Amino acid sequence: MDFGLVLQTDPPASAVISLMKRAERNGFRYGWTFDSAVLWQEPFVIYSQILANTRKLHVGPMVTNPGTRTWEVTASTFATLNDMYGNRTVCGIGRGDSAMRVAGRAPNTLARLGEAIDVIRDLAEGREAEVDGKPLRIPWIRDGKLPVWMAAYGPKALALAGEKADGFILQLADPYLTEWMVKSVRKAAVAAGRDPSAITVCVAAPAYVGEDLAHARDQCRWFGGMVGNHVADLVSRYGEHSEMVPDELTEYVKSRQGYDYSHHGRAGNPSADFVPDEIVDRFCLLGPPEAHIAKLRALRDLGVDQFAVYDMHDAKESTIDAYGAQIIPALNG
């Protein structure tokens, strides 16, 4: 099982780079960041420094979207990093939540997202693609490689991931929902004539190692609020108690009263006060190392290839170190 570290690009960038170096020393193979230009610093600038200061770490956004940058710019940026540091990037992509909404735009449609996945991958790997009705190719790319992993929750998005993406990103660590969603992605892959086992499955969620569960829950409750943005979209699209979406995912957002993006992804987010302890426990990894190991083994048995640790709380360094010393060796020893 691979492990990734997910950070926000809060200033100073040197702190982000330092944590990524620490992660690599502790056995993490991937370094991810949020990508929301108004809320945080520009991640692609920071990726260059992370790659320069690590040896094998793969980096990418969790997640970018098709609307913030033009597709040729996104592809060229990834290709430039790969040319400099040897194909060590991954394009995590989704419809866009905070990056689009904070800038006053709606998230992208699934149709636009599906088109972008193909175009960005083709351009970044040196092939011709059509952008706004015009054929384009980036002529300087040689031996480029860019896996594109798609974040999804709802049935249509899960189907799109199975049809087009190289990897599937699921931003929660509930085994029941993971099983349901992975099956949906693989079913769509088969229907599209693809090998479902070739799609990398990445589960991303906060992890907090320690005995004080009450404190850990308070530090990670923000995640239920963040996921709730996407769940609320699903409820508005499919309705409550829809056969298309499990109640286990949607039930908890009934008492949600809006969302303030100025606290997005941060411990103590007041917009996450509707999230009950049960959801925090289900969606996150909390408790002593043994609890993390048990849940990760269950996720691995469901076909999860990577667990990416959202490290947005008051124990960033100790979480990375605990994973390196006890949890990663237990999963890969």
Image: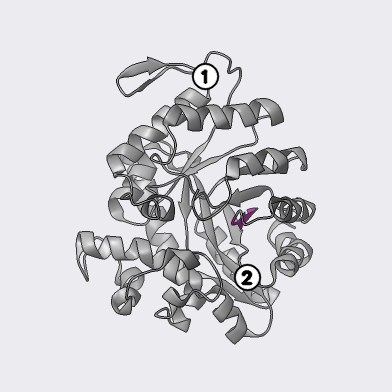
Q: Earlier in the sequence, mark 1 or mark 2?
A: 1
Q: Which residue is mark 1?
A: 126
| 170 displayed left or right of 135 | right
Q: Nearer the viewer, residue 238 or 183?
A: 238
Residue 44 position within the rendered picture, expressed as x and y whole percent measured from the top left? 59, 40
Which stretch appears magenta?
1-8
| Distance Cα–Cα, label 1 vs label 2 | 40 Å
Residue 145 position within the rendered picture, expressed as x and y whole percent measured from the top left? 57, 28
Q: Is residue 69 above or below residue 124?
A: below
The numbered disc on residue 182 is none
Query: Badge 1: how crowded within 10 Å, few (<14), some, or many (20+)?
Result: many
Q: Residue at x 55, y 66 (%)?
A: 298
Q: Is residue 79 above or below residue 105?
A: above
Q: How are the residues colored?
A: one colour
Q: Main secondary structure of the magenta part?
A: strand
| 102 displayed left or right of 18 | left
Residue 282 position within the rendered picture, expressed as x and y whole percent measured from the top left? 48, 74
Asked if the stretch drawn in magenta spans residue 23, the answer is no
Query: Badge 2: how crowded within 10 Å, few (<14), some, or many (20+)?
Result: many
Where the C terminus falls, by quadrant? bottom right
Number of numbered labels in the structure image: 2
Dot 1: element = loop
- Outermost top residue: 139
Closer to the eye: label 1 or 2: 2
Dot 2: element = loop
Q: Which residue is mark 2?
A: 313
Q: Residue at x 65, y 36 (%)?
A: 88
Q: Is residue 321 visible?
A: yes
